[in-house]
Amino acid sequence: MIELTEQQVQALEHADASPPRVVNPRTKETFVLLRVDEYERLKDEEYDDSPWTREELEALAWERVKREDWDEYDDLPEKP
C-alpha cells in the first residue's frame, strides 16, 4: 500500500476532478483514485456493464415514447 504525503492529501481534498486523477511520470499513464467503498460497489456482482440486450433497448425505447409530447407533431406538414 502507498501512503500519501501531506501535500498529496491536500491536493486530493482540493481536487478539481472527481475522482482525482494521478499520472505515472515514467509511463504517462493516467489513473483515477477511488475510495474503497466506491471500488467495492463497482466490482460488486450486481453491477452489470455488459452490452444492453434487445429487450432492455426495447423497454428503454417504450419508456421514452411514453414521455413524448405527441401534440407537437400535429402541426407538421404532411408528406407530399
Image: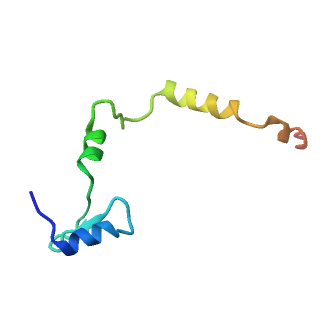
In terms of image quadrants, where is residue 51?
top left
Q: Is residue 71 left or right of residue 28?
A: right
Q: Is residue 10 left or right of residue 69?
A: left
Q: Is residue 22 left or right of residue 19?
A: left
- Counting from the top left corner in percent of width and height, residue 67 is at 70, 34
- At horizontal 62% and vertical 30% (from top left) the residue drawn is 63
Which quadrant of the figure contains the C terminus?
A: top right
In terms of image quadrants, where is residue 5?
bottom left
Display coloring: rainbow
Could you say which is closer to the camera, residue 61 or residue 44? Answer: 44
Judged from this view, the residue extending furthest toward the left is 1
Which quadrant of the figure contains the N terminus?
A: bottom left
Could you say which is closer to the camera, residue 62 or residue 14? Answer: 14
Q: Is residue 46 above or below residue 14?
A: above
In terms of image quadrants, where is residue 66?
top right
Judged from this view, the residue extending furthest toward the top is 55
Could you say which is closer to the camera, residue 21 or residue 50? Answer: 21
- Counting from the top left corner in percent of width and height, residue 23 is at 23, 69
- At horizontal 44% and vertical 33% (from top left) the residue drawn is 52
Q: Is residue 54 above or below residue 32?
A: above
